[in-house]
Image: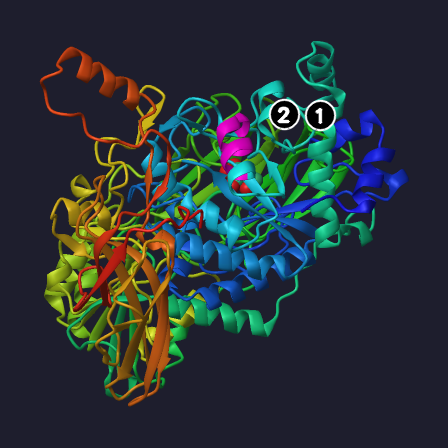
Amino acid sequence: MPASHKVEQLVGELTHDEKVLLLAGSDMWSTHPVARLGIPKVRVTDGPSGARGGSIPGATTTTSLNVPCAAALGATWDVELVEQIGRAVGAEARTKAARVLLAPTVNIHRSPLSGRNFECYSEDPLLSGKSGAAFIRGAQSQGVATTVKHFAGNEAETERYTTSSIVDARALREVYLVPFELAVKEGGTLGVMTGYNRLNGPWCAEHEELLAGILRSEWGFEGFVLSDWFACAHTVSALRAGLDLEMPGTGRFYAPEKIAAAIDGGEVAASDLDAPVSRLLSVFERVGAFGDPLEPPPDEAVDKPEDRALVRRAASESMVLLRNTGVLPLDATKMRTIAVLGPNADRLNVNGGGSASLNPHHRSELLPAIRDRFTSDVELAHVAGCDIDTSTPALRVPVTAEVYAGTDWQGPVRLTKSFSSSELLFFGPVEDIGEEFSFRASASYTPDASGPYELSLVQAGRARVHVDGELALDGITNPPPQGTELYGLGSKETTTTIVLTAGTPVDIVVDYTSLFSVLLRGVKIGLRPLTGDDPIAEAVAAAARADAAVLVVGTNAQWESEGSDRESMDLPGEQDELVRRVAAANPNTVVVVNTASPVTMDWADDVGAIVQAWFGGQEMGDALADVLFGDAEPSGRLPTTIPLRVEHSPSYGNFPTENGEVRYAEGIFVGYRWYDTRALPVRFPFGHGLSYTTCTIGAPGLSESSVAAGDTVTVDVTVTNTGARRGAEVVQCYVAPRASALVRPPKELKAFTKVWLDPGESRTVQLELEPRAFAYWDPGNPEWVHLADMQRECNPFGPRPPEKRTEAGWRIDAGVYDVLVGRSSADLPHRLELRLTPSDLPAPSR
Ligand code: BGC
């Protein structure tokens, strides 16, 4: 994107000080305006589950479209659908007056335990990259720049600000960089966000090889690069590497005095600022920001019926039917009693935690969605059976806070703020008050049941809680230590037990002061009934009475979140026991797994059906009911292998970090590449997913059986719906080299397509195998000439040293390849032989 005349002119007219200001944010979510030249303040928004604008759950109430998480979108294997989702999120960003969307996340599902897997598409680089590129094309069609993130090697959350990902050159090129490369080359992303982590030593935000070398020189990226929030660590190296924008504002390492010192010290020249400023302004121009008001207008919440419909369809088409003995789809006309069980049944987890979280425009829940399908004489029993919250959940009741300037509740009330739950957060300075304030918040709660309840407090600052005038928790006199909640800025939870009476309201009053807080201020007050000795027994009894049991197990945004990784692949709490006992009580048990990452499923062979339902966004309740009752086809396929146990997974033993480094010791053998190579059995293979119809994949044909290495070949495949319902098939094509100069996985996904077919319908689809489908990255060995000479010198009678490449690059070996076609990485009935003949064609760059 060469700078336009206008941008060149602007760069010429900007003063040095104005250029410096443009290189760092002005606040949490915006860049600096330059009013005299008509350069507006450009707002950015998270990403990637929607566009939340300045609204942070708990702190503000503005709502946004909550789309299914990226792992769910990856499971659709439908790039057109992902593009439509991108378009909807891009349009939503504009309603938040944002021109930059901090999405998509295209890191790889390296470990089943990574806290941010939900934000990422797949364990496979091609599926991740094609999905990410589609999202980008959709979002950017709406006049926003995407910032694909987190570049690169950002596959764990533990010690995320310091850890160095130690990734070898082949794994980097063949796995971890591929989605970013596709985001640049096929998606045309205008922005890239660097990761918090270090990569093989240097921090990503100042990684010259990564930013100046690979991204810009090799891939030809012409957009702008911004840091993750507070990820920038040095001025000179970041400027040299090509980091254009430090976020958030105001700048710390790109602060005027730091840049001045770098220039005075002769480490950078004043003219070096022209390139980053020009890149930034070129992106602003490209998205149309120069026509925007200087100060962005406030966020709007625009809830569109067509978006709800799209998100509902995407959620249902992401759901993967892992197993079905014939229980699904449920037939509402044949049932008198249904049991809907499990800790997530009445509060589906629709999104992961952290910066991707937002206030959805709407929340469709499963229980009403199921109830709607029955007449009133059908009994619907709901029992949670166990509890999986890592801390006591906030109460969903209206709360009003009266805010005072100063930290001691003195003077007039300066602001009255309403909240929809007992999580009461203030992000950054409070308007017209600043960072030092106090508030008194009150709520009334009427319990449904009598008995003991756990009351809890997590504070970012200091607070105490009164119930009906009695002091119940005091975090002012006895402040608890730092914990992990409230974006890592909250205290550990303190709890007490109170006894409540059904139907009798209690007044809960919180006194909060911002003393000892930074950035995020406020409290989370939790309340939950303390359960009896064997809550599972109640669920089992309900299941035993019912015609079918729908058991919704899973995690939630506490377990799968930015900021932490899971410690175990097992379902939290007593859920495995719950599944076993419910399944034993009712053979028609459908287990819905409401997670975004794989979980251990030792009970898989003992249940009637399993649906992997992901975090499906705001319409998930209806979408899930659509799938359960057969109104929608569960057309998702696994974007990530579900291993038998975490010990089998490729990164086991090297995840997350040790002494500040996370070793990607499995190299290129990520996901199914690992399980295949090691011949390890898995619970459900990559690409797997059943259907309510049956399709056949006919014998495929190759455009040619022998081509020059570096040519493209196409594979024709005819798919027929042989069942009685409309349904989908995902045709998957893997390439397997028979021999290779360097070690390679037995097979790799190189093309795929999803086809929808009416009963009896046949369609022929074409899959393209481009040169890169056959290529591997050869890091070469620059020492080899010298080593070979040494060998000849030391032992002139020994064998001749082999020829080896000394330069790194993409290579395609001539020889025979198997092209495998089928419906999952473990179900590939068709094998075609393809010969690649030696050629002088240049090595494929893409
Ligand atoms: C996350 C980014 C996010 C940013 C702004 C960071 O903590 O890693 O993905 O875009 O915050 O919220």
Q: Position of residue 56 (x, y in %)?
A: 58, 46
Q: How far apart, in angstroms, are the residues tagged by discs 1 and 2? A: 8 Å
Q: Nearer the viewer, residue 536 or 258?
A: 258
Q: Is residue 758 visible?
A: yes
- Please give the range of residues in magenta: 205-215
Q: Position of residue 392 (x, y in %)?
A: 39, 43
Read off the residue under disc 2.
Answer: 239
Amino acid marked by disc 1: Asp
Please tell me how crowded label 1 is: few (under 14), some (14-19), or many (20+) other residues with Cα within 10 Å: few
Q: Nearer the viewer, residue 603 or 640?
A: 640
Marks 1 & 2, CB-CB < 8 Å contact: yes
Read off the residue under disc 1.
Answer: 272
Does 363 appear above or below 404? below
348 in the magenta segment: no
* Colour scheme shown: rainbow
Please tell me how crowded label 2 is: few (under 14), some (14-19), or many (20+) other residues with Cα within 10 Å: many
Identify the mark at residue 803; answer none if there is no mark.
none
Amino acid marked by disc 2: Leu
- Residue at point 17%, 39% (across, down): 647
Task: Report the magenta stretch's main SS.
Answer: helix
Q: Position of residue 486 (x, y in %)?
A: 49, 36
Q: Is residue 565 visible?
A: no
- Residue at point 72%, 19% (across, down): 269
Sequence-wise, the earlier of marks 1 and 2 is 2
